[in-house]
Amino acid sequence: MSYGQFCPVAKAMELLDERWTMLIVRELLTGSSRFNELRRGVPRMSPTLLSKRLNELARAGVVEKRVVDGQTSYDLTPAGQELRTVVEAVGTWGIRWMGEIGDADLDPKLLMWDIHRNIRHDVVPRGRTVIEFAFSDCPAPLRHWWLVLTPEDADICDTDPGYPVALTMSTTLRDLTRLWRGDLTWAQASRADAVSLAGNSRLRRDFPRWLALSDFAAVPRPASAAAAGLSSSAAVDKPAPPR
């Protein structure tokens, strides 16, 4: 695609305005480098189109494709790394001014993938801790998820991993998405019974500290967002254990 303009904005958008391209850059900036990792960050994108977009980014000098011991990885070049401020600015603008999310925007695969990679491992208990998430508004195949945590790692499973469950979170996909985005704080979720935790009382109290939330959760919202029923400030309250 060519805009036929010498303007550097137009030239940049000839590459970045292609469908899914900026979301792939977003995933690369968050640390994904393997093809399957990237797919989990854009679960509704076809593998064929993902491969095509990665090749386009490589030809443009934004991504470097490497094959080591038969394993392919994709890494941002210095040109790609410069897009971090662009992605952060777009995300900040989007959370402030495009706050309303429709049912079609809700995706448990992407939400749980995001949650698993934003864990504060320094406050996670020693050993293995398993949290089950139960979404009352999702169809049966997507209703239950398991987050397996250690101080070193986090894994997300869409089938029961077979370990004892320490905590069970019951909520809706929309409410947990709002909490993750910072539209709803832990304290607000607790008061509204939007999120509930069942299990050991100490773990229920500590769990909000384990979850770092979205990078955009702390972006202040305009007054118009509050008028629409959203939190006017995404600053997270002192964690209150959901009931």
Image (spheres, rainbow, N blue to C red):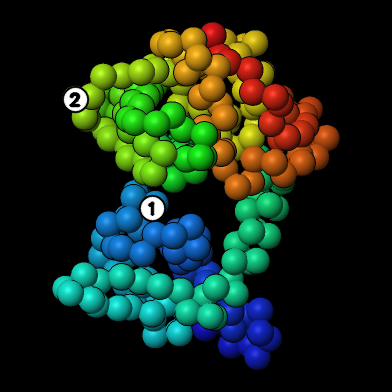
Q: Please say if 52 is above or below 190.
A: below
Q: Nearer the viewer, residue 31 or 62?
A: 31
Please identify the quarter of the rendering in which residue 88 is found: bottom right
Q: Residue at x 62, y 80 (%)?
A: 10
- Residue 94: where, in percent of width, then height? 65, 50
Residue lying at the far right in this picture: please name it: 223
Element on which disc 1 rests? loop
Residue lying at the far front in this picture: please name it: 126
Which residue position holds label 1? 42
Q: Residue at x 57, y 30 (%)?
A: 209
Please identify the quarter of the rendering in which residue 87 is found: bottom right
- Residue 211: where, in percent of width, then height? 52, 34
Amino acid at the residue labelled 1 = Val
Please identify the quarter of the rendering in which residue 150 is found: top left
- Residue 98: where, in percent of width, then height? 66, 45
- Do the residues under discs 2 and 1 have CB atoms within 8 angstroms? no
Residue lying at the far left in this picture: please name it: 70
Q: Residue at x 54, y 8 (%)?
A: 243
Q: Please say if 238 is above or below 152.
A: above
Q: Nearer the viewer, residue 10 or 106?
A: 106
- The numbered dot on residue 162 is 2
* Side of 62 relative to 6 (left or right): left
